[in-house]
Amino acid sequence: MNVKRTVEIVLTVIGMVLFGIPLFVSTVVMGGIDDPGVREGVENFINSSEFQAQPGAEDFTSGQLLTMFESLGQFVLIASIIGLAVGILALIFLIGNKKPKAAGIMLIVSAIVLTLATLFLGIFGGAAYLVAGIVALVRKSRKPLDGTVT
């Protein structure tokens, strides 16, 4: 008799959906970089008295700020895509109870790494992956009455 992995599967799917949030945010940020209104707003911010009062502000240009946001958006985008890929792989391992321990380890490690990699934008997806991973590792197979493990 196999253990049903419904809880782990549902939590993994929830985590995948929640890792879609940083994916969406990074896509929007990267898409807005080339917008003339965004460029003008960044230029106004760079030239503002509040920004200029900061030490080292005179060495910072709007192009550098936009490049930083673009690089950050790409990094979060890649981390989110990896998060979705890990979720799909974990689902494959969990459905049919094929490799629940491997799925659990993958989910726990990816929860920690991807929460940090998405700069905590993926904290809720990471939490779902972490709980799913722990449940996958802790839950044991049921033993039938004759003593054999299935």
Image: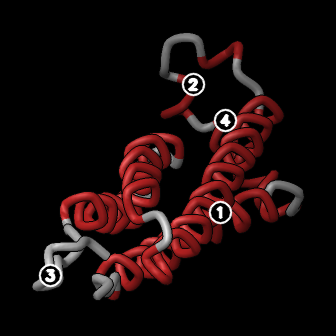
Earlier in the chain: of badge 3 and badge 2, it is 2
- 3 or 136: nearer the viewer: 3
Identify the disc placed on residue 146: 3
Where residue 145 sits, quadrant-wise, is: bottom left
Q: Which numbered disc covers residue 85?
A: 1
**Front of the two marks 1 and 3:** 3
Quarter location, residue 97: bottom left
Residue that numbered label 4 is attached to: 46
Sequence-earlier tag: 4 or 2: 4
Give the x, y percent position of residue 20: 57, 72
Q: Which residue is mark 2?
A: 52
Where disc 2 sits, the SS reads: helix
Residue at the image position 89 percent from the left and 57 percent from the top: 34
Disc 2 residue crowd, few under 14, some 14–19, many 20+, Cα 10 Å? some
For the point 69% across and 46% down, the residue is 44
Which amino acid, by three-letter code, is at mark 1?
Answer: Ala
- Dot 3: element: loop
Name the residue type under label 4: Ile
Task: Please provide percent x and percent y for residue 138.
Answer: 19, 61
Asked if marks 3 and 2 touch (Cβ < 8 Å), the reply is no
Q: Amino acid at mark 3?
A: Asp
